[in-house]
């Protein structure tokens, strides 16, 4: 995961972009192995710079939520996943509408 990513693409290269079929796009609060699931906008990772990195390296695979938090009255997590997919789509639209730096 790219924690508080900078606008630099030093985290990845265009060669690595071709190696991945999909990116599990999730956010968490706290630390590895001691964390809470979070919605994309509500965790420790700033997601807009992360999506910019994928854009800048030419990644063209799937970006999808793999886990979402539990919310009341949504035991199957359909609403939670719908929110996460909508948020990811909005991030993609925002970032891809901007010029690559």
Image: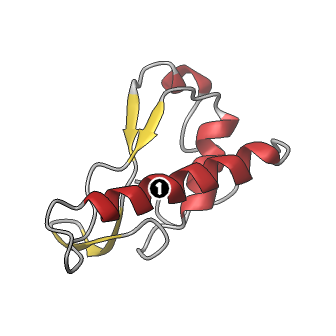
Please name the residue shown 24% across and 77% down the image. Answer: 71
Q: Position of residue 24 (x, y in %)?
A: 35, 44
Q: Which residue is mark 1?
A: 2
Q: Is residue 96 left or right of residue 92?
A: right
Residue 14's place in the image compared with 35, above or below, is: above
Please name the residue shown 56% across and 53% down the image. Answer: 50
Q: Is residue 9 left or right of residue 87?
A: right
Q: Position of residue 95 (x, y in %)?
A: 71, 50
Count of numbered labels shown in the rendering: 1
Please name the residue shown 74% across and 43% down the image. Answer: 96
Q: Crowding near pointer 1: few (<14 within 10 Å), some, many (20+)?
A: some
Give 24 or 12, whichever is nearer the viewer: 24
- Image quadrant in which the C terminus is located: top right
Q: Which of the 4 image quadrants contains residue 81?
A: bottom left
Please name the residue shown 57% across and 49% down the image. Answer: 89
Q: Position of residue 34 (x, y in %)?
A: 16, 74
Q: Position of residue 64 (x, y in %)?
A: 40, 43
Query: How is the protein colored in the picture?
Result: secondary structure
Indicate the secondary structure of the residue bearing disc 1: loop
Q: Farthest residue in the front direction?
A: 73
Residue 21's place in the image compared with 3, above or below, is: above
Residue 56's place in the image compared with 36, above or below, is: above
Give 38 or 17, whichever is nearer the viewer: 38
């Amino acid at each position: 995961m790219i924690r508080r990513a900078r606008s630099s693409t030093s985290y990845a290269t265009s060669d690595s972009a071709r190696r991945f079929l999909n990116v599990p796009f999730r956010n968490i609060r706290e630390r590895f192995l001691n964390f809470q699931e979070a919605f994309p906008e509500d965790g420790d990772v700033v997601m807009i710079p992360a999506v910019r990195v994928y854009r800048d390296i030419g990644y063209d695979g799937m970006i999808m939520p793999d886990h979402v938090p539990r919310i009341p009255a949504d035991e199957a997590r359909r609403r939670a996943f719908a929110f996460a997919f909508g948020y990811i789509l909005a991030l993609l639209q925002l970032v891809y509408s901007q010029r690559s730096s």
